[in-house]
Amino acid sequence: MTWTMILAYLAAHWLETAGVVTTILGIWLTTRRLLICWPVVLAADVIYLVVFYRARLFSDTLLQLFFIAFTLYGWWHWWRGVIEEGDVRVVPLDMRGWLVGLAAGAAGAILLGGLMVRVGAALPHLDAALTSYSLVASWWQARKHTANWWLWIAVDLIYIGEYLYKDLRPTALLYAGLVALAVLGLRDWQRAAAGAAQREATSLSDSTA
């Protein structure tokens, strides 16, 4: 494939390409726990709402609407945390949180899958399951739980195959990159959590000395 062919493809799929760029930037900023990640992610949500609607991936289209809501909530929740604590603090997720989240994802997959069959969506059950668990991951991310990265890694790996099947090649490539970014985010958030725990332990030790 020549550079001319690549440029022609990107020009013909300019909206999807814009979604790729903004999504990568937004997720990278999220891994760094920077508040500016949220307006960038919001732009990506809106772009992909249009892309997925055109591809008749209606579960993904619906997902973008929820993403927009979660993005606005996450923006507010992180901003409040910065005001109160000085930075974005990672919050642990206990076993009950894991079980509730995974159960909610399964229930959402069943309900949404039945709806998508009725409206004639492409890959209704698979897309519904990925949509449902993406919502769980988004909620965990907005709540600053490191567990969001584990779930994103699993979901994004499956999304790669779905988008290749639907001939959304730039998006499939994007999700391969998102897997790598999720691994990076997991590492950085775990380090941040460990550092915060160590600082709290040191502070507690100093106060009792």
Image (spheres, rainbow, N blue to C red):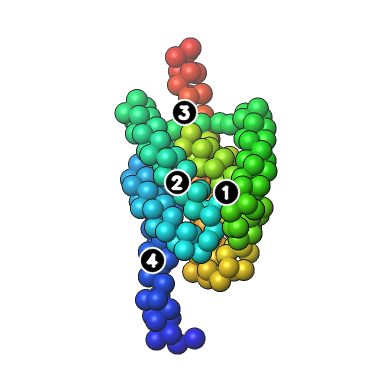
For the residue pair 15 and 142, the one nearer the viewer reads as 15
Disc 3/disc 1 C-alpha distance (Å): 37 Å
Residue type highlighted by circle 4: Leu
Please give left or right for residue 24 compared with residue 129 in the image: left
Residue 185 x/y as whole percent: 50, 48
**Residue located beneath label 3 in the image:** 199
Q: Which mark is residue 15?
A: 4
Looking at the image, is mark 2 or mark 3 earlier in the sequence? 2
Query: Which one is closest to the eye, mark 2 or mark 4?
Result: 2
Q: Residues within 10 Å of mark 3 (few under 14, many from 20)?
A: few
Q: Residue at x 50, y 45 (%)?
A: 188
| Residue found at x 42% / y 59% | 50
The answer to which of marks 3 and 4 sits earlier in the sequence is: 4
Mark 2–mark 4 distance (CA, rounded to whole Å): 18 Å
Vertical position of residue 194 compared to residue 127: above or below = above
Is the residue under label 4 in contact with that under label 3 (CB below 8 Å)? no
Looking at the image, is mark 3 or mark 1 nearer the viewer?
1
Tag 2's secondary structure? Answer: helix
Mark 3 touches mark 1? (CB < 8 Å): no
From the top left corner, tell me how far across and down residue 76 is, in percent.
36, 34
Is residue 157 depicted above or below 30 in this figure? below
Determine which residue is flagged by label 2: 65
